[in-house]
């Protein structure tokens, strides 16, 4: 019976509780699931119910509690009692219901690393009475979001009956990645602005932070055009058609459906319509993500720089007549574009935002799927982290199948092998992470000056 009851109790446990018991229960070094839940609850109260001034007061209270533990030797307990009294009344007031306001704000779905974005948080008073002390902020619910820079951290607004106001909040993410953010919240605070009530708003949302990229004015692609089944209609419309370019005299064997009847009537002899098959450039972007399991700092800098270079190339192609069809990032291949006139840059940046290093050489894995598509591709643009035998053999195979090759090596210092000896593969260049950083800085400065000139002109 006891065994059956134990099994029922075991099945009633959550997976987190079972893992804790399997690791030793109370004798394990990790805290229990209940303790972790209590820690998360306390942390959330500390971050959301205490203002910056309230957190400072709580820290001072803890210091005074330690220093005044022996009241016979010092009078620090008087300071402890004063600070505790300051916190007691606001804590009681924080149990009041949340303010009756209408909040209109929306976090951006996508950001670019190190590029600030200003949100306009609109707050309207619908309570029928004045609200003198309201706190507007953007909370950070998880550890990854602690990298997010929010300015100002706290905004205080006062609203009369029926008033509405906009509070600007600037967000900036220093690192690319996938962030789970909570939207702006509004809460009422006590007159001393120490403790806040329950807040309005704060729904969670996933935001992708794109890698930084710079503007490339000219990126010469190796010449090459191939006939594409479906051609331009594949990229812009649905269906199968060819482009009408003019008329010519009838030749034996021309199909009757191509006869241009108006020209025949005007000239008195058969005339047919002439079409041009559609040829244009389709590209594949290949990003090398192979790093050792414990990469050095300079290797990680090269990895991030390579991602920025590929994003810059994709941005350039999105503004040109080329079609980026495939993105091979590490061991995975992504179909990023259905053709010309579609915005495939966003698809590529979505992939690059969450990309992590690969610890196994990916070239053997991505090779066969990519080689199958080379019949429709004209050029492969590869951004590599180093130059060695495996990378050279991969690009040599691409070249042997009739596809042009361009490679950019992003590596700090000299590469493993001399890339200059492989000039027959195509155009190869070398950049260091410092070179990429200078280009990013110059491009950011150029955009800032353009924006300043536009504001000055208006």
Image (spheres, helix red, strand yellow):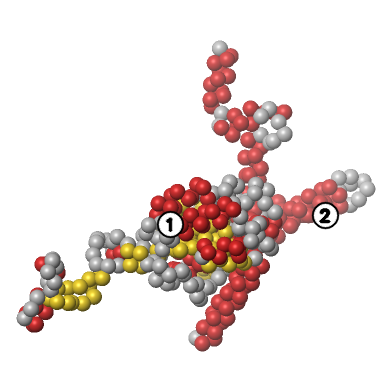
- Residue 14: x and y, percent? 55, 32
Residue drawn at x 59%, y 53% is 389
Extreme residue toward the right, this view: 73
Residue drawn at x 13%, y 74% is 250
Which mark identifies residue 79?
2
- Residue 172: x and y, percent? 59, 64
Q: Is residue 138 left or right of residue 253?
A: right
- Residue 121: x and y, percent? 52, 66
- Residue 73: x and y, percent? 93, 48
Q: Is residue 259 left or right of residue 217?
A: left
Q: How many marks?
A: 2
- Viewer-side residue, 375 vs 126: 375
Assess disc 2: are there few (<14), some (14-19) or many (≥20) residues with their C-alpha within 10 Å of its C-alpha.
some
- What is the CA distance from the residue labelled 2 to the residue labelled 1? 81 Å
* N-terminal-most mark, 2 or 1: 2
Which mark identifies residue 23?
none
Which mark identifies residue 401?
1
Figure quadrant of residue 342: bottom left
- State the SS at label 1: loop
Above or below: residue 448 compared with residue 112: below
- Viewer-side residue, 296 vs 35: 296
């Amino acid at each position: 019976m006891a065994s059956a009851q134990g099994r029922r109790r075991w099945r009633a446990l959550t997976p987190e509780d079972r893992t804790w018991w399997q690791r030793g229960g109370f004798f394990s070094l990790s805290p229990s699931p209940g303790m972790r839940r209590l820690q998360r609850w306390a942390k959330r109260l500390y971050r959301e119910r205490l203002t910056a001034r309230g957190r400072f007061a709580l820290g001072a209270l803890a210091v005074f509690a330690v220093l005044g533990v022996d009241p016979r030797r010092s009078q620090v307990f008087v300071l402890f009692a004063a600070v505790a009294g300051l916190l007691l009344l606001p804590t009681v007031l924080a149990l009041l219901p949340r303010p009756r306001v209408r909040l209109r704000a929306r976090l951006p779905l996508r950001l670019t690393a190190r590029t600030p974005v200003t949100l306009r948080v609109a707050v309207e008073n619908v309570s029928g009475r004045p609200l003198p002390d309201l706190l507007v902020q953007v909370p950070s619910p998880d550890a990854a979001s602690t990298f997010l820079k929010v300015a100002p951290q706290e905004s205080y607004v006062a609203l009369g009956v029926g008033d509405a106001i906009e509070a600007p909040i600037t967000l900036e993410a220093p690192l690319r990645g996938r962030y789970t953010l909570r939207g702006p919240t509004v809460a009422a605070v006590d007159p001393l602005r120490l403790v806040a009530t329950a807040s309005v708003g704060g729904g969670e949302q996933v935001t992708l932070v794109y890698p930084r990229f710079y503007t490339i004015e000219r990126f010469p692609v190796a010449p090459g055009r191939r006939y594409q089944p479906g051609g331009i209609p594949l990229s812009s419309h649905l269906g199968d058609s060819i482009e009408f370019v003019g008329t010519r005299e009838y030749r034996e064997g021309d199909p009757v459906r191509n006869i241009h009847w108006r020209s025949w009537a005007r000239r008195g002899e058969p005339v047919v319509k002439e079409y041009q098959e559609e040829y244009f450039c389709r590209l594949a972007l290949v990003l090398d993500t192979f790093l050792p399991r414990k990469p050095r700092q300079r290797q990680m800098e090269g990895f991030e720089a390579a991602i920025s270079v590929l994003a810059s190339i994709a941005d350039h192609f999105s503004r040109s007549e080329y079609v980026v069809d495939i993105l091979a990032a590490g061991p995975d291949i992504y179909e990023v574009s259905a053709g010309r006139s579609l915005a495939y840059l966003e698809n590529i940046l979505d992939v690059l935002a969450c990309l992590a290093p690969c610890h196994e050489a990916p070239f053997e894995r991505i090779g066969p799927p990519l080689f199958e598509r080379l019949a429709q591709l004209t050029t492969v643009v590869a951004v590599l982290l180093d130059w060695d035998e495996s990378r050279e053999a991969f690009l040599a195979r691409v070249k042997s199948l009739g596809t042009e090759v361009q490679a950019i090596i992003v590596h700090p210092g000299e590469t493993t092998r001399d890339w200059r000896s492989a000039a027959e593969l195509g155009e190869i260049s070398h950049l260091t992470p410092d070179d990429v950083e200078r280009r990013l800085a110059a491009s950011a400065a150029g955009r800032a000056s353009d924006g300043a000139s536009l504001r000055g002109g208006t």
